[in-house]
Image (cartoon, rainbow, N blue to C red):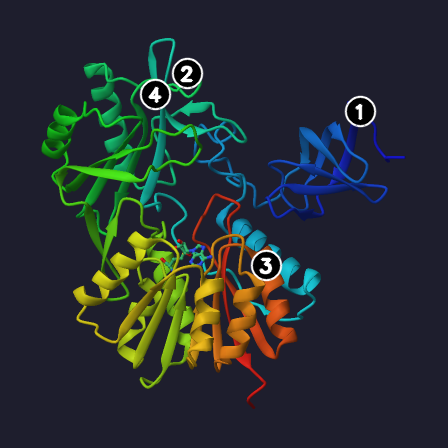
Amino acid sequence: MQAITKNNNYEAIVEDYTHEGMGIVKIEGYPIFLPDVLKGEVVNFKAIKVNSKYAFGKVLDVLKESPNRQTPPCEYYFECGGCQIQVMNDAEQASFKKQVVHQNINQQARLNLKINDTVTGDSLYYRNKSQIPVQKIDGKVIMGFYKSRSHDIVDIEHCYIQKNVHNDIMMFIKDKLIEEDTSIYDELTHTGLLRHIVIRSNSDDSEIQVVFITKSKRNEFLSITKALKTKFPNVKSVVQNINDEKTNVIFGKRSIVITGQDYITDTLLGKTFKIRDRSFYQVNHAQTEKLYQIGLDMANLSGNETIIDTYSGIGTIGLAASDRVSKIVGIEIVDSAVEDAIENAKLNGIDNAEYHLGKAEEVMPALVDEGISADVVFVDPPRKGCHTQFLDALVEVSPKKIVYISCNPSTLQRDMKYLERHGFKAKEVTPVDLFPQTKHIEAVTVLENTNTL
Ligand code: SAH
């Protein structure tokens, strides 16, 4: 029997947060999840979805407010799915993120490690990449971001987490699309042209790329591009990417340059990187520099080491370490990223880097068979974390240190636990906030090899 009944109202105190940033209240030990409440608040809520082990509720009233509650800076916050924790002030967001890392590392994996305070930074106007879906509804062009768990777009004029120049460009393009009556893609009928606009800028906004993602290769963007370049001279690259599939994946496989180069360049920890439209590049530049610097400091490199940069993307982490290592071996699954990494090494005059194309879980065992040895391995996987086949090979390489950078504390704790069982021990984990206003959490740690002590 559940302790609560659907559609009834209850009063409770918010005890904790879920990994999604929702508040947890309990009635007779039974947990109910509520959006947009802060720890310590007393709330009145209605039970709206009641399952056997937990329920979801709708907040009717906050009877006692937390001093850390803030009015969301963004007027679209309660509608838009892009942000989840704008009701928390910066301090509360930092403490929420630290707590989620703590729950994962110390309660789930029981690793009993020190969790450092979240490394924070500017909490607004930080995103250097905006992926903006475009729709036409009743003849009106709609551009913005999806509502949570939906493909309905909230039509927005200003996003507080993307860089402000992206807001200017977004609105400029919208006006032009209306003026030119550009054909817009319709998801349901799979007809029409323009699906998404992607805007990406480098750290000082001196180079900006705009991508029109379209269903076919028909180019209706020449005059918009011309106007865009006149109004925003820092737009150095305009690309059309073609995606003719019925899919949620934003980018298609083919890109055509409309004007300028097919890339922009950015500087990260003193090195220059070329970034193409489909390449992975961290969205928060200032915080990424802090994150990678912490990782490099943890590696404590002397200059003679061989490092393996796994999940290397366009080569950022390894190349940032290049002044302090004798050899870099990169592993990455996306071929264009490997091409970029090779080119980025050259661009920075680095000749001691080699890159292997393939799945880390396949390339790493192959390198072990070839007898590779490495002093430090950097691990920076996507959200799903590492394959055990990769971890087994990593254990066999037996580096002195593993620096693990993670965008998902839940797979981080799973992988750390596995590595700990194989003799790799960490002392501390540091959360770094790369995604303020959202539930997303980045963390970095170093695991030392106790097998060789
Ligand atoms: N270290 C880079 C990229 C990190 S993102 C940076 O900081 O910029 C994770 C990267 O892992 C992406 O480039 C993605 O293409 C790659 N990837 C995903 N699954 C992989 C796998 N199984 N093996 C190797 N690389 C993978």
**Badge 3 or badge 1: first in the primary sequence:** 1
Where is mark 1, residue-wise?
Answer: 8
The quarter of the picture where residue 452 lies is bottom right
Residue at screen point 58% across, 86% down: 451
* Residue denoted by label 3: 101
**Label 4, residues with CA under 10 Å away: few <14, some 14-19, many ≥20:** many
Callout 4: helix, strand or loop?
loop
Q: Which residue is mark 4?
A: 185
Q: Secondary structure at mark 3?
A: helix
Q: Position of residue 302 (x, y in %)?
A: 34, 85
Quadrant field for ligand 1:
bottom left
Q: Say the numbered circle drawn on residue 205.
A: none
The disc placed on residue 189 is: 2
Mark closer to the observer (4, 1):
4
Hey, what amino acid is under mark 3? Val
Foreground tag (3 vs 1): 3
In the depicted structure, whether residue 66 falls above or below residue 369: above
Distance from disc 3 to disc 4, alpha carbons, whole Å, reads: 40 Å
